[in-house]
DNA sequence: GGTAGGCGACGAGACGTGGT
DNA sequence: ACCACGTCTCGTCGCCTACC
C-alpha cells in the first residue's frame, strides 16, 4: 500500500465521520509531497523528522503537523499497514503563545480615516463599505468570516443584535452591539438601500459596488493598502505586520480577549470622533 | 489548574486570469 | 504592462476538551 493511498483512505474516513479535516488533509498532502509516492512501509523516521522540522524555528505548526501524523499513523497501525510508527519519540515544548498587535489609538484613528477615504473606481470594495466593516470587527471582535457571512436578516438594528450562524465549532450565537456602532451600521444599511442593492433578507449585509458579496481576499488586500497608506508598521522584529485579525484584540479586552461584545467604548469612539 | 490533543479559522504569498 | 481579484498552499492562531 503506498502512502498517498493510505492518506486518502484516512482522510475519507475522518470526513465521513463529520470532521471537516481540511487542515489535516492539507498537512498530510504536504507530507506525501515531501516524502514522495512510496510504500508506507518505506517511510523513514529521518524523513518524518525532516518534514516536521521544516524551515525556521519550532512554532505551533510543528505540533500541528505532529498531531496530524499521530492520528494518521494510529490509523495505519490499526489497519496493519505499518508495524511501527516513524514519528519521533521526543516532542519539543510548545512555543510561547503568539502576541497579537494592539493598535494604538492614533493608529486606529488613521486607519479608520483611510478606510473612509478609500476609493478606486476599479476596486469592487468601496470605502463606504470597508469603514463600517472594520468598525464592526473592532467594535465586536467578530472574525472576518463571520462579519462577511452576515445577511440582512442577521443584522437586527432595532434590537441591536447580530446573529452569527454556524461559526467556529458549528455554533450560532447572538452578539449585542452598542447604540453608536448600530448607528454606523444603520447609516451603511441606509446607503446600501439607496444605491439599489438587493434587499432580500438572505442577501449579504456587506456588498461590493456591483452587489456581490465581499470576499475575505478583497478585505485583506484592502487592509494591506490601508495599513500602508496610514503608515502603520511593526518594527519590533515580529513575524507579521499588524493584521486584520489583530482588530479583535485591543487594550480594552486584554483580560477577556475576543469576548467583549458591543461597543468597545473608549478607544473606538475617541477614534471615530477624530477620524 | 496545567498541559496536550484535536480541529476550525485565519494570514500570507505565489500564481493564474481577466479587464483596462 | 498593470491591477484587482480568485484560488491554492503552507504556515499559524485560538478555542474546546480530556486527562493528569
Image (cartoon, coloured by chain):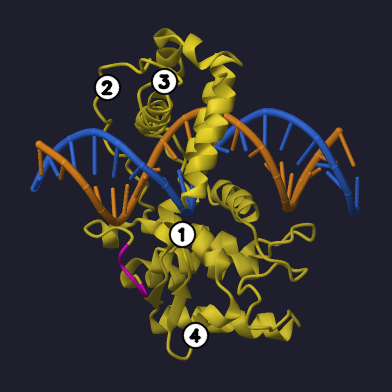
Chain colours: A yellow, B blue, C orange
Image location (x, y in percent) of residue A220: 58, 51
Q: Residue tagged by mark 1?
A: A143
User: How much space separates mark 4 and mark 3, taking CA atoms?
Assistant: 47 Å
Q: Secondary structure at mark 3?
A: helix
Tell me whether the residue at label 3 lies in contact with that at label 1, contact meaning CB atoms closer than 8 angstroms: no
Q: On residue A186, which mark appears?
A: none
Q: Nearer the viewer, mark 1 or mark 2?
A: 2
Q: Residue tagged by mark 4?
A: A156
Residue A18 in view? yes
**Sequence-first tag of 3 and 1:** 3
Seen at 47% across and 52% down, the residue is: A18
Q: Residue tagged by mark 2?
A: A91
Marks 2 & 3 on one chain: yes
Instruction: Specify few, some or many for label 2: CA neighbours under 10 Å numbering under 14, 14-19, or 20 or more.
Output: few
Image location (x, y in percent) of residue A229: 59, 50
Q: Residue tagged by mark 3?
A: A52
Dot 1: chain letter: A
User: How much space separates mark 1 and mark 2, taking CA atoms?
Assistant: 32 Å
Amino acid at each position: 500500500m503506498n502512502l498517498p493511498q493510505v492518506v486518502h483512505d484516512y482522510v475519507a474516513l475522518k470526513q465521513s465521520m463529520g470532521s471537516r479535516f481540511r487542515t489535516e488533509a492539507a498537512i498530510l498532502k504536504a507530507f506525501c509531497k515531501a516524502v514522495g509516492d512510496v510504500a508506507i512501509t518505506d517511510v523513514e523516521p529521518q524523513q518524518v523528522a525532516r518534514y516536521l522540522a521544516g524551515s525556521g524555528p519550532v512554532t505551533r505548526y510543528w505540533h500541528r503537523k505532529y498531531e496530524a501524523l499521530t492520528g494518521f499513523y494510529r490509523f495505519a497501525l490499526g489497519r496493519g499497514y505499518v508495524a511501527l510508527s516513524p514519528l519521533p519519540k521526543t516532542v519539543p515544548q510548545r512555543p510561547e503563545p503568539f502576541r497579537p498587535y494592539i493598535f494604538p489609538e492614533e493608529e486606529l484613528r488613521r486607519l479608520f480615516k483611510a478606510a473612509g477615504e478609500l476609493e478606486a473606481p476599479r476596486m469592487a470594495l468601496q470605502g463606504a463599505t470597508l469603514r463600517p466593516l472594520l468598525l464592526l470587527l473592532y467594535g465586536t471582535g467578530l472574525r472576518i468570516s463571520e462579519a462577511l457571512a452576515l445577511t440582512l436578516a442577521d443584522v437586527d438594528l432595532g434590537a441591536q443584535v447580530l446573529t452569527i450562524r454556524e461559526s467556529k465549532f458549528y455554533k450560532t450565537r447572538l452578539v449585542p452591539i452598542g447604540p453608536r456602532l448600530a448607528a454606523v451600521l444603520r447609516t451603511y444599511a441606509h446607503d446600501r438601500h439607496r444605491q439599489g442593492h438587493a434587499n432580500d433578507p438572505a442577501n449579504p449585509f456587506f456588498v461590493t459596488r456591483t452587489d456581490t458579496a465581499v470576499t475575505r481576499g478583497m478585505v485583506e488586500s484592502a487592509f494591506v493598502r490601508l495599513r500602508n497608506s496610514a503608515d502603520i508598521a511593526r518594527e519590533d522584529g515580529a513575524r507579521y505586520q499588524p493584521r486584520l485579525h489583530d482588530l479583535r484584540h485591543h487594550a480594552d479586552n486584554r483580560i477577556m480577549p475576543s469576548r467583549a461584545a458591543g461597543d468597545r467604548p473608549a478607544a473606538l469612539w475617541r477614534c471615530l470622533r477624530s477620524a
